[in-house]
Image: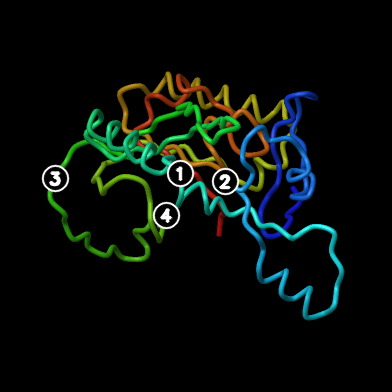
Amino acid sequence: MRKISGCDKRGINLRDNKLTEETLENLLSGDLKTDKSIFFSTDSATLNRMRELGYRYDAVPQILDFKKLLSETKFPDFVRTVLNALKTAYNYPVDIEFTANFTPNGDFRFNLLQCRPLQTKGLGRAIEIPQPKEEDVFFSSAGNFMGGNVRLPLGYVIFIKAKEYLELSEQDKYQVARLVGAINKKLKGENVLLAGPGRWGTTTPSLGVPVHFSELSNMAAICEVRQVV
């Protein structure tokens, strides 16, 4: 993936049915079928620097910052309403994925693709977790995570090593996913923690383990490992 002006420019080319990379210049010169200023603003810093250096330019440099979209349209209020409605319905904050198609006059059609409540089992008061002895630590994590704290005794841990998994062929990665599914079925009713590299449930094996929901539905906890130390 190539980065241009500090932002990834990889998207779906509907005409060729594949992922492609485009420069900002190509996006600006194309027909977006809506007001481009909703998404782009003048890159004042670059423009001033070019003037200082005496560079000539055929077009004013632009930056993709969505400034007008977020400050001068109804889009943020609409999304806020959607999130509040979903939060009320689920009784939890939610994580969503969406698309938005804009018309020439700036109106938009909002499509909700996924909705995931950010929750864990049960509610309760906050507790202070005692620090275990180093020899008693099976694994540890630092930083933020999705959901609240939960005390969950574990009977089994399924751990897929990142380095070994990434060295597998694509076919073997799918075999790993099917094996996880078989274990998921066998250990139904047990408290099992599932840990492995990348995203669970991805459709791209290079990004994680391509399991289906039914192949991890019995897991009590799921961990996505970025790096094994």
Give the distance between the C-alpha atoms of the residues marked 2 and 4, in whole angstroms: 46 Å
- The residue that disc 1 covers is 73
Give the distance between the C-alpha atoms of the residues marked 2 and 3, in whole angstroms: 44 Å
Q: Position of residue 71 (x, y in %)?
A: 45, 52
Three-letter residue code for mark 2:
Ile
Residues marked 2 and 1 touching at CB (< 8 Å) = yes
Q: Position of residue 117 (x, y in %)?
A: 33, 34
First-in-chain label (2 vs 4): 2
The image shows residue 134, relative to residue 34, as above or below, that is: below
Residues marked 2 and 3 touching at CB (< 8 Å) = no
- The residue that disc 4 covers is 139
Give the distance between the C-alpha atoms of the residues marked 3 and 1, in whole angstroms: 40 Å
Give the distance between the C-alpha atoms of the residues marked 3 and 4, in whole angstroms: 25 Å
Three-letter residue code for mark 3:
Gly
Disc on res. 38:
2
- The residue that disc 3 covers is 124
First-in-chain label (3 vs 4): 3
Q: Most extreme residue toward the left, as rendered?
A: 125
97, 197: nearer the viewer: 97
Three-letter residue code for mark 4:
Phe
Q: Nearer the viewer, mark 2 or mark 3?
A: 2
Disc on res. 220:
none
On screen, residue 159 versus residue 162, left or right, reads left
**At 66% across and 57% down in the image, what residue appears?**
63
